[in-house]
Image (cartoon, rainbow, N blue to C red):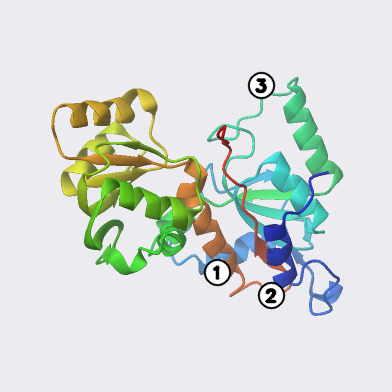
Amino acid sequence: MKQLTRRDFAALAGAGLLAQNASFSRSRAITAGQVVERIQKNVGIPWNPTTYRDTFKIGTPEMEISGIVSTFMSTYDIFQRVVKAGLNMIVTHEPTFWSDRDITKDLGDDPLYREKLGYARKNKLVVWRFHDHIHAMKPDGIFVGWNRALKWDKYQVGDDQRMFIMPKTMTLEEVTREVKTNLQSDSIRVIGDPKLPVKKVVRGSHTLAGNMSAVLEADALIVSEAREFDSIEWMRDTVLSGQKKGMILIAHERGEQAGMNYCAEWLRTFITEVPITFLSSNEPFWRPA
């Protein structure tokens, strides 16, 4: 079983999750369905009943909850760490079974699917996804957390959570190092001249069209979900054509996980029956020395 990291231990201990906390008594039990009802009531926007993302992926609304973990991705590792902490509900931003719609009808014979689902059922885990509506919050809850983690919330341009004006002109390399340090990432890749002067930065898009539009507004893009065969190759040709632009490509997880840390804080404002904490699903990559 996966052991808790020091960071996990600090987070869980700070939230009172490593011991039986008397303030969370069995008489104050709450079900998974009631948790979701509270979220729907407090999200501040009309709930879209046709969403295929923000639904239960494992477990049922009737299941009683011992504690909630907010995370970016409900990986097998997260399952193990949640069980180790004695909790049983995971509020995940991204899929559990490796596709946007969490389609499992063709995975019945897949050994990893059977093992992951079996582990969840054995340990009475509930997994509920919170994607569309946290992004639709005013302001976007994911970007509230990300801008704060990046320490650029003070550079935000008005209400535009994707646009930043730096306090002074920096080189592309300097901006990249700041992103690397503040997001604690070791998997950043960059396109563009390291000495490129950068004053205005915009968070890019999943799509080529979105990135083509965004780069017109800024000196550099930060992108966490772009396909290499379109957006990346387009940016490479943009730079090779002589345009003074840059792109900082970060892991998808580092682009949104801080928003789920904010989500845990937000949940604690209206769910008091059980402990709530955030666990990082961590970057999926490592680099050789």
| Foreground residue among 99 and 161 | 161
Residue under the image location 68 percent in, 65 percent down: 11
Horizontally, is 71 left or right of 152 in the view?
right
Is residue 264 among the parts visible in the rendering?
yes
Would you call the spot at circle 1 few (<14 residues within 10 Å), some (14-19), or many (20 or more)? some
Residue 90 % position (x, y) = 68, 53
**Is 177 placed left or right of 97 in the picture?**
left
Q: Which residue is mark 1?
A: 266
Does residue 59 sit above or below 235 in this rendering? Answer: below
Q: Amino acid at mark 1?
A: Trp
Q: Secondary structure at mark 1?
A: helix
Amino acid type at image mark 2: Thr
Q: Position of residue 152 (x, y in %)?
A: 35, 63
The front one of 177 and 73 is 177
Q: Label 2 vs label 3: CA separation? A: 39 Å
Mark 3 and mark 1: span between their CA atoms? 36 Å
